[in-house]
Image: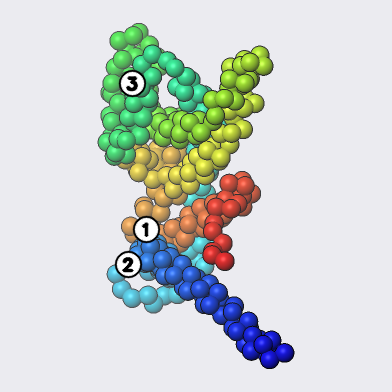
C-alpha cells in the first residue's frame, strides 16, 4: 500500500511534460507563421486593405481631392453611379469580356494545349511563339494594335493590296464592332497564358492512363474527353478564376487603345473610374469600391461553389 501511495504523485505528474511540449510546439508554430507571413501581411494591409477603407470613406463625401473632407453626402455617389447609363454599360462590357473569355478563350486554349502536348515537329518553337504575346508589356502590345488597326494602318493597307478593300474599316472607331475587336486583341494577348496553364496541368496526367485507354481501343479524342479532361478539371477551374478577375479589372489594354470609346462602346469599370476620378475623386472612389465589391463577391462565390473540392485539405489545421 505504501508503494502504491508513493507511486501516485509520480503517475499524476507524468502528463505535464507532454502538455508542456505541446504548448511549446504550438508557440513555435505561431512564431514561425508570424515570422514568415508578418512582412507580407504588413505590406498587404498597408497597400491593399487601408487604401480600400480609405476609398470607402472618400466615397461618402463630395470631395474635390484638394481640401479636407467636409461635405458628407452619404450614398449619393453610389446612387449616381448606378443611375449613369455609361457606368452600367461599362459593367456590361466587363461581363461581356468575362463570358466571351470563358466561352471562347477557354476551349481554344484547351484544344491548342492538347495538340501541343503531342509529339509534333517544331513543338518548342510553336509554344514559344504562342507565349510571346503574353510576355509583351501591355502598353507596347496595345500601341502596336492601335497603329495596326488605325484607318490608315497596316491591316487596311494589306486588305487593299489583296483586293479586299471593301473589308477595310476603322476597326477601333466603329461602335458596333469595337468591343469585338478589343476582345480579339485581348485573346491574342492572353491566350498564351491560358495555354501555358493547361500545358502545365497536362503534365500531371499519367501517361499510363492513355496507354490503358489505347489498349482498350479508345480513340484519341475519346481518351481526351473521358480521361484527360476530368483530370484537367482543377487546372481549368484555376484558370477560370484568374480569367474572371482579370476581365472585371480590365484597364490597361483598353485605356491605351481606345480610352473606352468610341461612344463608350469599349468602356470598362476601371476606365470609367479613372476618367471620373480625375475631376471628382469622391465619385471615383465610389466606383472603385463598387468594382472591389463586385470582384470580391464573384471570387468568394466561385471559391465557395466551384473551387471547394480543390481547397479542401489545403489549409493546415495546426500541430496536435
Q: Height in image: 66 above or below 241?
A: below
Q: Secondary structure at mark 3?
A: helix
Mark 1 vs 2: CB contact within 8 A: no
Say left or right for 310 vs 290: right
Q: Position of residue 23 (x, y in %)?
A: 51, 75
Task: Check disc 1 and report the residue beneath it.
Answer: 277
Q: Height in image: 36 above or below 248?
A: below
Say left or right for 296 vs 266: right
Q: Foreground residue, 92 or 169?
A: 92
Q: Quadrant of residue 277?
A: bottom left
Real-space Cα separation, disc 3 to disc 2, in angstroms: 51 Å
Real-space Cα separation, disc 3 to disc 1, in angstroms: 45 Å
Q: Foreground residue, 171 or 206?
A: 206
- Which residue occupies 48% across, 47% down? 245
Q: Quadrant of the C terminus?
A: bottom right
Which badge, 3 or 1, comes first in the chain's sequence? 3
Q: Position of residue 130 (x, y in %)?
A: 37, 26
Let me know if residue 187 appears in the view. no
Q: Quadrant of residue 127?
A: top left
Task: Check disc 2 and report the residue beneath it.
Answer: 65
Q: Nearer the viewer, mark 3 or mark 1?
A: 3
Which badge, 3 or 2, comes first in the chain's sequence? 2
Mark 3 vs 2: CB contact within 8 A: no
Real-space Cα separation, disc 1 to disc 2, in angstroms: 9 Å
Mark 3 vs 1: CB contact within 8 A: no
Amino acid at each position: 500500500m505504501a508503494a502504491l501511495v508513493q507511486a501516485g504523485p509520480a503517475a499524476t505528474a507524468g502528463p505535464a511534460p507532454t502538455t508542456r511540449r505541446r504548448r511549446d510546439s504550438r508557440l513555435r508554430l505561431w512564431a514561425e507563421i508570424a515570422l514568415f507571413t508578418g512582412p507580407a501581411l504588413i505590406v498587404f494591409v498597408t497597400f491593399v486593405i487601408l487604401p480600400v477603407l480609405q476609398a470607402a470613406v472618400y466615397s461618402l463625401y463630395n470631395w474635390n481631392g484638394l481640401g479636407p473632407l467636409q461635405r458628407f453626402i452619404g450614398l449619393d455617389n453610389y446612387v449616381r453611379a448606378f443611375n449613369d447609363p455609361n457606368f452600367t454599360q461599362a459593367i456590361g462590357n466587363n461581363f461581356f469580356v468575362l463570358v466571351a473569355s470563358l466561352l471562347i478563350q477557354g476551349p481554344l486554349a484547351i484544344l491548342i494545349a492538347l495538340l501541343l502536348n503531342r509529339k509534333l515537329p517544331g513543338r518548342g518553337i510553336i509554344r514559344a511563339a504562342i507565349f510571346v504575346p503574353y510576355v509583351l508589356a501591355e502598353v507596347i502590345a496595345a500601341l502596336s494594335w492601335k497603329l495596326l488597326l488605325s484607318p490608315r494602318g497596316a491591316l487596311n493597307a494589306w486588305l487593299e493590296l489583296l483586293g479586299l478593300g471593301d473589308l477595310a474599316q476603322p476597326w477601333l472607331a466603329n461602335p458596333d464592332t469595337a468591343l469585338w475587336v478589343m476582345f480579339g486583341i485581348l485573346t491574342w494577348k492572353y491566350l498564351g497564358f491560358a495555354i501555358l496553364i493547361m500545358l502545365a496541368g497536362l503534365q500531371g496526367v499519367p501517361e499510363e492512363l492513355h496507354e490503358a485507354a489505347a489498349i482498350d481501343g479508345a480513340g484519341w479524342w475519346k481518351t481526351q474527353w473521358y480521361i484527360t479532361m476530368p483530370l484537367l478539371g482543377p487546372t481549368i477551374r484555376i484558370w477560370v478564376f484568374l480569367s474572371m478577375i482579370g476581365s472585371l479589372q480590365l484597364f490597361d489594354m483598353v485605356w491605351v487603345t481606345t480610352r473606352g470609346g468610341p461612344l463608350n462602346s469599349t468602356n470598362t469599370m476601371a476606365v470609367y473610374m479613372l476618367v471620373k476620378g480625375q475631376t471628382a475623386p469622391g465619385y471615383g472612389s465610389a466606383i472603385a469600391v463598387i468594382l472591389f465589391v463586385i470582384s470580391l463577391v464573384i471570387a468568394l462565390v466561385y471559391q465557395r461553389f466551384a473551387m471547394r473540392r480543390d481547397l479542401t485539405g489545403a489549409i493546415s489545421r495546426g500541430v496536435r
